Image (cartoon, grey):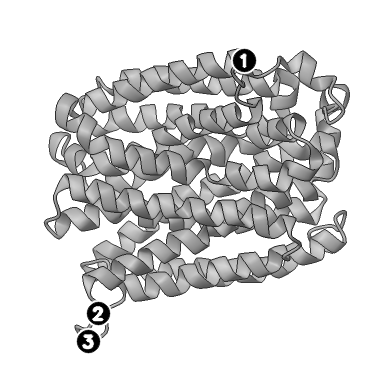
Amino acid sequence: MKATRLHPAWVVIVAGVSVAMHIGKLPPALPVLREALDISLLQAGFLLSLVQLAGMALGLAIGLGTDALGLRRSMLLGMGILCGASALGGFAQDAHSLLVLRAVEGVGFLLGSMPAPSLLRQLVAPQDLSRMMGWWGAYMPLGTALALLCAPWVMGALGWPGWWWSLSALSLLAMAWLAQAVPSDAVLRQSPTGSNAVAERWTSRLRLTLQSGGPWWVSLSFAMYSCQWLAVIGFLPTVNAQLGMSSTLNGLLTATVAAANMLGNVMSGRFLSQGVPARRLLRLGFGVMGLGTVLAFGEWQGWALPAALRFVCVVLFSAVGGMIPGTLFSMAVRLAPTPSTVSTTVGWMQQWSAAGQFLGPPAVAWVAVQAGGWQWTWLVTVACCVVGMGLSGLIARALRHPQEMPNG
């Protein structure tokens, strides 16, 4: 009986998960790195967010260039950069070296993940796109959860450098699989859903993207989501370690929180395909994220929820909040002005998402330092949720008028 090959779209998602593990590899290693390399809490915040520097500065530019370079080729190049930077990171002797290499990894992350939505659009049938975008939205929480779960075991056996080298090897394997399973860029461009971006001037694609309201609203919404999600998940191992939790239990609980995010991503694809409005999913996601952090971190005159209930609130924060990225990836594909601007739209969204991830952890760390604890973390997250809920209405308006100007 002939074995059935895995559909190339699933290989793209698996490759994205391997890329996301490089983002998730740092939080469980922070307590070890702070002791080994004498890293301050504020440096730890920038170490968490610096990987997003490339996306914050270059997301739109790389989005414009990926079609010309080739979507498949861009992903392979990104995984190659991650492979090299992670291998070198294992030899770092101080915080500054690790910070520089995390910025390089940010370039690899951008190239390795950003072309995927446009690539998936060319690999799957239109009726399957919302469902597949829901699965793609889960690449980050799944990669983060796997990293959080595996890190204590690998670091226990090989130390934190061995953890960096292990993920370098994983990137190399993912590169080989993607290169073998996904058709070449030349073949993809000839498909019915192929982009004609190579034939269009980059200035035309840039103007179309930035003059349309939809790309702006999905991008700003993603920033409001990513800002708080990375901050909470990134510092959760540190918070738990300060409570005296063992590294193994810490990794398991934090991985559970990150994995819960997958549920919302996958369900968003199902809900959208069944006709549930994007606005409703976004408002529910932001509402639960805000309420979850108030209950999980808030303290009033010495009173706070028991630890077990706090953990449940953080799980709900991640699980229901997961509907936001899954919805926004689908909206980015739908609200791109033309098929040839999908990568540019996703690049713009990635740029704002990276900005949120760059600013969120240091903001939460600064509030924690000022407050002498984590009890005011919810001030940052609730502010993001209020803005995100407002933006959901603008996304609904953009769906009705996709070519509307941002200031229209």
Q: What residue type is labelled 3?
A: Gln
Q: Is residue 52 above or below residue 91?
A: below
Q: Between 168 and 373, which is closer to the camera in this rendering?
A: 168
Q: Which amino acid does label 1 sit on?
A: Lys
**Secondary element at image label 3:** loop
**On the image, numbered disc 3 is attached to which residue?**
301
**Secondary element at image label 1:** loop
- The circle drawn on residue 2 is 1
N-terminal label among 3 and 1: 1
**Residue in view at x 39 percent, y 58 percent:** 363
C-alpha distance separating marks 1 and 2: 59 Å
**Secondary element at image label 2:** loop
Q: Is residue 17 left or right of residue 373?
A: right
Q: Where is residue 89 in the image (x, y as percent from the top left)?
A: 31, 23
Quarter location, residue 369: bottom left
Q: In this view, does 126 lie to the left or right of 259?
A: right
* Extreme residue in the front direction: 1
Q: Between 369 and 246, which is closer to the camera in this rendering?
A: 246
Quarter location, residue 85: top left
**On the image, numbered disc 2 is attached to which residue?**
304
* Discs 1/2, front: 1
Q: Are marks 1 and 2 in contact (CB under 8 Å)?
A: no
The residue carrying pointer 1 sits among few (fewer than 14), some (14 to 19) or many (20 or more) residues within 10 Å by Cα, namely few
Q: Are marks 3 and 2 in contact (CB under 8 Å)?
A: no
**Residue in view at x 78 percent, y 36 percent:** 125
Q: Where is residue 17 in the image (x, y as percent from the top left)?
A: 48, 34
The residue carrying pointer 2 sits among few (fewer than 14), some (14 to 19) or many (20 or more) residues within 10 Å by Cα, namely some
